[in-house]
Amino acid sequence: LTTAKTAAPAVENYEEDDDLIGLITSNADASGQYVIFRNGFDKLYAINVAKVEELIAYNEIELTDNSNTFSLISGVAKVRGNVIPIVNFDRWLGNEADMSAYELVMICNYGSERLGMVIKNVLGILSIDSQKMVDNSDKDEKTSFITEVALGGVHGLCLVFDSDKMLMDIFPKIETTEIAKTHGLTLGRFLKGKLLSAEDSGVIRGALITVYEQLGLDYEVFKNGQLLLERLRELDPDNVSLIVTDLEMPVMDGLKMIE
């Protein structure tokens, strides 16, 4: 991946008149690529590049403030002709630095929703091996896993945050609306065996369980591909009808599990 104006791997240093830093993902293996960024307290965080549309200088956006001081949504801004909610990443984490610490807005695309996330800066883009990721969700519900990174002369621990949970925290109606769509679902084909499912996000695991329960399936859900694979080896293959897996997971991702 490269920036729109330079092929350098890091985009931390940019000129004030650079109104857009575009991330080109067309030739990237998005399943293992992460954008590494800093929050207002210089801690390292990561998000999969598949969710990142572009980076915009914070001082280039015209923000209409939210009337609710304590809202996770700071306000809205018009980006590329679209009105997008702007979220302060640190406020979602439970802290808020001085606004002078923030330099970028990361535009994230969830398919049905888009939002801008206010961050300090971006170090660059890094491939992370799932085997080097340690599950951290039991210690912090807002992070999926933790890993060690070295990029642009910076070395340290990096938290891959649960972006699905952030979306649900900011737009709680989404979860209710999406689950409501599953009411009345029926199986179009009888499954004569167990369904195994792997998903590291606690929010998505909960949604999957809701659907599986409504369908009356015999199912088991795991936090990563390694746990699912270990369980699969204990079962008679004839008693397993379907496997549903996420791609991005710690310890073992979905692609490795399929292999």
Image: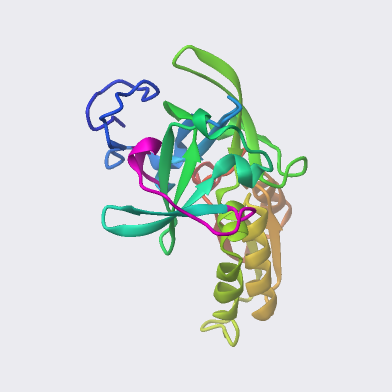
Q: Evaluate whether residue 252 shows in this view.
A: no
Front-lying residue, 150 or 86: 86
Front-lying residue, 6 or 235: 6
Q: Specify the color scheme.
A: rainbow
- Report the side of 257 relative to 137 (left or right): left
Q: Is the residue 87 above or below the residue 181 in the image? A: above
Residue 33 percent across, percent down from the top left: 43, 35
> Outermost residue, right direction?
139
Write down the quadrant of residue 197 in the picture.
Answer: bottom right
- At 23% from the left and 33% from the top, the residue drawn is 4
- At 35% from the left and 44% from the top, the residue drawn is 61
- Report the side of 202 relative to 184 (left or right): right
Front-lying residue, 76 or 220: 76
- Report the side of 46 relative to 251 (left or right): left
Q: Is the residue 173 above or below the residue 113 in the image? A: below
- At 58% from the left and 58% from the top, the residue drawn is 170
Front-lying residue, 32 or 71: 71
- At 60% from the left and 84% from the top, the residue drawn is 183
Residue 22 percent across, percent down from the top left: 29, 38
Write down the quadrant of residue 191 in the picture.
Answer: bottom right
The boundaries of the magenta stretch are 52-72
Q: Is residue 182 magenta?
A: no
Q: Is residue 70 magenta?
A: yes
Residue 37 percent across, percent down from the top left: 49, 30
Q: Quadrant of the N terminus?
A: top left
Q: Evaluate whether residue 180 shows in this view.
A: yes
Figure label count = 0
